Image (spheres, coloured by chain):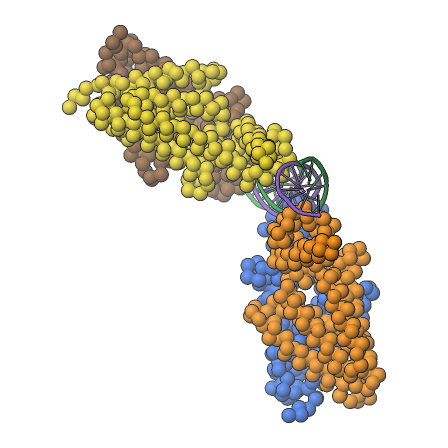
Chain colours: A blue, B orange, C brown, D yellow, E green, F purple
Amino acid sequence: MAEDDAQLGAKRRAILDAAQKVFDARGYEAATMEEVAEEAGVSKGTLYNYFQNKEDLFAKVFSERLSGDQAELERLIEEPLPALDKLCRIMDHVFSQLEFYIGSGRLIMDLWAHAARQRKEGELAVNIAQTNTQWRKWIEAVLAEGVAGGEFARRLNPSVMASLIWSTINGIIVESMFDTEAGSGHRSLSALKQGLIAELTSWSTAEPAD
Amino acid sequence: MAEDDAQLGAKRRAILDAAQKVFDARGYEAATMEEVAEEAGVSKGTLYNYFQNKEDLFAKVFSERLSGDQAELERLIEEPLPALDKLCRIMDHVFSQLEFYIGSGRLIMDLWAHAARQRKEGELAVNIAQTNTQWRKWIEAVLAEGVAGGEFARRLNPSVMASLIWSTINGIIVESMFDTEAGSGHRSLSALKQGLIAELTSWSTAEPAD
Amino acid sequence: MAEDDAQLGAKRRAILDAAQKVFDARGYEAATMEEVAEEAGVSKGTLYNYFQNKEDLFAKVFSERLSGDQAELERLIEEPLPALDKLCRIMDHVFSQLEFYIGSGRLIMDLWAHAARQRKEGELAVNIAQTNTQWRKWIEAVLAEGVAGGEFARRLNPSVMASLIWSTINGIIVESMFDTEAGSGHRSLSALKQGLIAELTSWSTAEPAD
Amino acid sequence: MAEDDAQLGAKRRAILDAAQKVFDARGYEAATMEEVAEEAGVSKGTLYNYFQNKEDLFAKVFSERLSGDQAELERLIEEPLPALDKLCRIMDHVFSQLEFYIGSGRLIMDLWAHAARQRKEGELAVNIAQTNTQWRKWIEAVLAEGVAGGEFARRLNPSVMASLIWSTINGIIVESMFDTEAGSGHRSLSALKQGLIAELTSWSTAEPAD
DNA sequence: TATGAATGAGTGTTCATTCAT
DNA sequence: CATGAATGAACACTCATTCAT
């Protein structure tokens, strides 16, 4: 029945939300399945009816969100627009997602720490690596498009610049963890966005001397 | 006796080195005091003669290195030089340290994840936060110096730009975790350094339109 | 309706067969009700409509087969025949059953281990003990018949000899577990049967010295 | 220190004894490490300082005893004696060990059940299989010796007869589990021993008809 | 009657920490 | 100070059993 499906989906969602909350508060290792179960209002056993194990649950907290991201973004990029506008769109999208990541910022650290320690095995590592690569590829594509279309300076190396931009984005996530002032993350985000845009623009207008 | 001191110091060092190695290889939670002891060539009990507990040992692995960093860098900045040179020095210093962080990159993730989960309590969090703040302050100071001295454009916001630079640096560390090509971290580092310098230079020369 | 009865009986049979298969493959403890249900093509809940619990299901796998055995054998023994012929019949019957036990040999071990741990309580233990006693009694009766009829030597102690024979049969089951050569169980069975018959015959013909 | 060694050995022994008791009373699966620890008067953790895991502990309960057996028996067989005497020695030895096996009879069932379900992997299965083979080989050798020396009838097949004898021994162990009369095991043992000897003798004296 | 989602008690195992020697 | 055996709290995961539909 549709009703059943909805209920199953709702419970699954409840578990994922609870897991996100607990993993975020305690960290992957310190979080206990017991606490996740309590938070979700189900029994421990139920967790295992929906997810294979702790690792899987942890991975799924992200993977579903991430795959959602990518589909949405892919459409954005297909549209016929100036490269700069596309880049702004990507950044806007990233920053809107950032709100989630910064809210669950401590979680991201765990995610990275975890992923960094399995490179090949877990779906976690694969997911992260793929997502990272995907984003960089998109940015690089847009930059290359801008260079080809004359929007950006010819000497701009799309690959390197894409890495730089993507690194900066990740760096902002890191920084937002350690800013002691609450909300400073959000405030500085828009400022940083402006900076990034200005930076790109300046690159594009800076005339090559050689 | 000085000899005893030296011996004590040596054993302490050996433990710290062993701890760094093991924490890096296994991650904080998965690392065991047993393995650290073995790696250091001492018994488990001895670990507790030098450090209060696992958390303390983990924290000390960084705090000593970090404080060493800062003393060295402070001298660098004091010298009378153009702001751009100073900035290059800071970056060179960072990047030389980066080699350590990237070598032990997975460790950094753990460190951040850990620190992000104690904001006020642990010396770990305090250390990280202080160090972060310190670095940003230095960069900001140098940028302000450059703006005041006319080296950089007047409209450049030193605080925001410092955050941006620092974020980028942290982002590079993150990225170097997930680059699948071995050694790509080191290769891209110098490329990224060039980019960063160029970026700053372009800012400084970009004439304000308004 | 008879049809319903037949269906119920069929389902019950299906569960018992599935249980036998799974218990044999996994062992009592490692076997799960889930797997039995799957194998039987029913849901977990249905198992509990036909059997009280896991223990009961395990017991029933044997008790029904065992009681079937006994009825059949009882008729065999009633017939007017020489004791040696009857003994051969019993042995033939045992060995034909042995094929089942050896096929499910690992199951028997579990059965014994289980039964050995409840002596008085469970129907399992009672069943085993009764069956064992029953078989020995039959063999003993036939031997006594042979002694009384002059077929076997007078000095033959039917009780002890019956135990010896029955022990040997059980021992063959045990041995067939650990024979590394596949099929060696069946091959050696007939050889052992010949030996057993020869042994008995030699007893019967061996003249008492005293 | 020798004192320390003795203490370690004593604790190891205490654990093994406790394990034997608990495994015997509850069965392998139902026995808990907790209970073994309590019985041995140590903490749960200590168990794991002496044995790798539950399986290992279970295996060691037997393996040490078994290897002791074999060394002792090998000497017995080397001595220059009539085959019949050697056979008696082997049987005496077996039956003296049997007292242990019958005391822990329920344990043996578990051992077999366990071993029967891993044939190749665990040291348990290997141990059992090797021990079984070893015993059969010894008996077979002695029988062959007797045939060669004219003590036993030429038509006696040492391999088959050895299997038969060994099966009978194992069968006695099984039977002793299910004898409702306490002590009947011991009583019947000597009777059965006589029977076995008589049986062999009758074989040896039975003249081949063909 | 059949189902299968939910339950939660139960257990093997790990490991930071202590302390007697 | 050094040792390492002992500790015991903690936790992921399983699975027999129930019960609402």
Q: Residue at x 82, y 81 (%)?
A: B145
Q: Which image quarter holds the C terminus of chain C?
A: top left
Q: Residue furthest right?
A: B148
Report the front residue among A179 and A101: A179
In this orientation, does residue B209 appear? Answer: yes
Q: Residue at x 34, y 21 (%)?
A: D88
Report the front residue among A119 and D178: A119
Q: Is residue B70 above or below residue D98?
A: below
Report the front residue among C59 and A52: A52
Give the image quarter of residue C197: top left
Task: Tell whether C132 sits left or right of C184.
Answer: right
Report the front residue among C69 and B148: B148
Task: Tell whether B42 sits left or right of C197.
Answer: right
Q: Is residue A75 above or below residue A198?
A: above
Q: Is residue B130 above or below residue A204?
A: above
Percent of width and height locating residue F13: 59, 46
In this orientation, does residue A102 appear? Answer: no
Percent of width and height locating residue D128: 42, 34
Percent of width and height locating residue A169: 70, 71
Give the image quarter of residue A117: bottom right
Q: Residue at x 30, y 23 (%)?
A: D81
Percent of width and height locating residue A78: 61, 77
Task: Tell whether B146 sits left or right of A61.
Answer: right
Q: Residue furthest top?
A: C210
Give the image quarter of residue D126: top left
Q: Residue furthest bottom?
A: A210
Q: Residue at x 23, y 11 (%)?
A: C207
Label count reads 0
